[in-house]
Amino acid sequence: MDLSTPLMAAGLANIAMLGWLAAAAIPVLLHLINNRRQTRRPWAAMQLLRRVIDRESRRIRLEQLLLLVLRTLIPVVLAVVLARPYLRGPSAAAVDVPLPRLWIVAIDMSYSMGYRHERETRIAQAKSLASTLVEESSVGDSYALLALGASTQVVIGRPTFDKNAMLTEIDRLACLDTGMNLSNGLAAIEDIVTANTQAAKAAAPEIRIVLISDLGEDSWGDGSSSSPIQRQLAKLAQAHSLQVVPVTNEDTANLAITALRSSHARVTLDQPFELLLSIGNFSPTAQSEFPVQIQIDGQTVASQSLDIPANSTQSVSFSISLNRLGPTVLSAFIADDRLQVDNQRSIVVEVIEQYRILVVAEQIQQARFLEYGLRGNADATKSKVTVTSRTELPEVRFEDLHGIVLYNLPRIDASIYDRLLRFCRDGGSVVLMLGNDVVADDWNTLADDSNPLLGFRITEVADEDLWEIDPLEYASPIVSPFAGFADAGLLTTPIFRFWKIVPDRPGQLIVDLATTQGDPLIVRQRIGNGWSASLLSAPQTGVQVANLNKQNTELWNAMATWPSFVPLIQQLMLTVLDTSPHEANVLAGQSLDGDIPGAVDAAIVSVKLPSGVVEQIATGGVTTSGVIPWHYYETLYSGIYVATGPAGLNQPYAVNVDSVQSSLVSLNPKSLPKQTTPQPTEFASDVTPAQLVYDKLPVRWLLGLLTALLAGESLLAWKLGRRL
């Protein structure tokens, strides 16, 4: 037997109320005063009755004494009831917390809490624990409730004394399809604690913080004492009682679609592309002949079966072609298991009839070779390439294009520069080929502090030499097709001169091809939803080289005469064109973004949720780009969202769960920090409702006794009064 654990614990939650025990003296004082007022006088008639009275005096005296005792006990019992006595068993006695208390209950709402063990999900277990805590807590306790997700929802921020209101809000909680930002949740708890402390000032209740979670490592970290999360937890535990209630399972097993990618974000009509799928087996059991389906509009268009070893991830690819123009939703499915939300994943792919590319040069004939090179095999690339001069560029509708190539232009107007920048941000792609005609100062002065279209400052021309090419391990998608094909001529391409540059933001600029001396030759950067790329030595044809020699002008390269030229510029264009005007594939908790023309009459955008509910979005004003941006932030659940509005807006968005939680890896509760508060307590990783609540039986017994005393006093007083 453990003698260190008390068999029983008892006490008074509000001992100051015992001051009302003084009221018990009132009946006694009244009795004594009444006796002192009696005056004895001899009376002949009374002497005749004395014999009878003497016989009854003993009984009357006992009845009066009993009535006095009853009247004295009534205020005594009432004072004890108001003092709120408690009586607890061994488990409860080990958690000694004075009353009254403020319970701050925070429940993990991340999608891993939807994992079903036997017949109950983790979120159902968490809600049951929280409800039991509230139901069995003491009268006078107050409550606050937080739902912890990617962003924290303060359900009840101002503490309430209404148990029913707290229970109702707990019952309404539903698991989200997001992860959990624990740091954000702990900050919200600190805000509630601070607000309550400032409001209470005097006689503030003891604060009890209860976190109910499956302790997913993606949210709680690895338990390192130096992690920011652990420091936040330790800070709270030092000042208040903080208890962590884990709802975990030892025998977890889950299969999930962890990734769904398309080889191209934008594809052409009826042109095959690859759909890449990854499936994680987070269980100790291998899966054989595991079925996977691809669906469009609820119809299965492809399926495969694969073997997945235990505790591993397996990838599979599907060759898909689409025969419908516009954004198309493709969904992958696997069989349901204990965690259903990660058994489906969707992606939006934009289908176009053909790529529309515009090549701009000082004179049209200078860029004819680019038209032929970019067009290549029309059946393979499905590209429509046109050439225009710089003077005609202001009349071109950029909205009708997918890509624009600026070939060796000395300069461009500031208005064209702004339009090109907007074109990129809206999902278009711009390729700049900088050669001997470029006036560096004119390009550098197009922007004040930096050059967002180029991403760099042009400095000087490299000295004439035969520069060797470094493919940078063929890591870039622009040069990766050349890997293993030395005869393709990429590494032997004659480069004699090129522009040297200084990046505005080195981490933002991607270098795809360079010289062996480390100088970039091809760079690109993401701008909004589009790309800009720069070839720092504009290709020259054999005719141009011959003319240059006649004119005694600088020779930059013989790129257009080399066998690597056509595949290189085609791959460059395909890489930057592989984008979409909308970022239509996001994770749950991320925003949906878009814009509509600023000239529309009614700037109202509606978003249809996966549940079928339609919500309207308040849009902002017209930007300097002439568009009205809109944003939708409440993507708490996975599925397909559809935005509709003016100017033909009808854009689907695929919202998927972040697969980081699919592994169901939980932090070991023993890794949680042990802290001592001013009234000793520590993280309780095995807290049960019986340890968190007070037994209300003493109060119930005393209320029953008080009722009996009142009834007995009334009955006895009526009986004595009737006799008199």
Image (cartoon, helix red, strand yellow):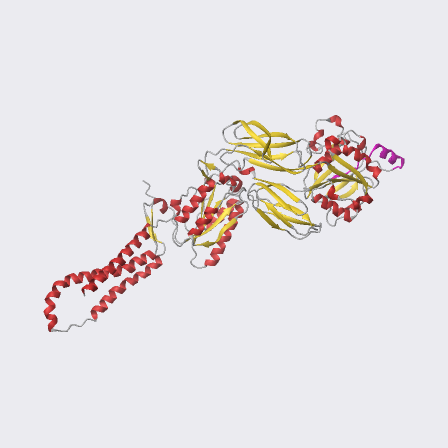
Q: Is residue 158 left or right of residue 539?
A: left
**In-front residue for pair 394/516:** 394
Residue appearing at x 17%, y 62% in the figure: 60
| Quadrant for the N terminus in the image | top left
Is 5 on the left-hand or right-hand side of 173? Answer: left
Left or right side of 539 for 244? left
- Is residue 545 within the magenta segment? yes
Residue sticking out furthest to the right: 550
Q: Give the range drawn in magenta.
A: 533-552
Residue drawn at x 32%, y 51% is 698
Residue 721 drawn in magenta: no
Q: Quadrant of residue 327?
A: top right
**In this rendering, does residue 464 appear at all?**
no
Say whether residue 357 is visible: yes
The quarter of the displayed image where residue 305 is located: top right
How many labels, in total? 0
Q: Nearer the viewer, residue 140 or 499?
A: 140
> For this rendering, which residue is in front, 304 or 137?
304
Q: Where is residue 675 in the image (x, y as percent from the top left)?
A: 45, 46
Query: Where in the figure is residue 695, as x and y percent of width and height?
Result: 35, 49
Q: In the image, residue 311 lies at what x, y percent?
A: 52, 30
Q: In which quarter of the image is the C terminus?
A: bottom left
- In percent of width and height, residue 350 lies at 66, 38
Instruction: Using the image as rendered, state which of residue 320 and residue 625 is in the foreground.
Output: 320
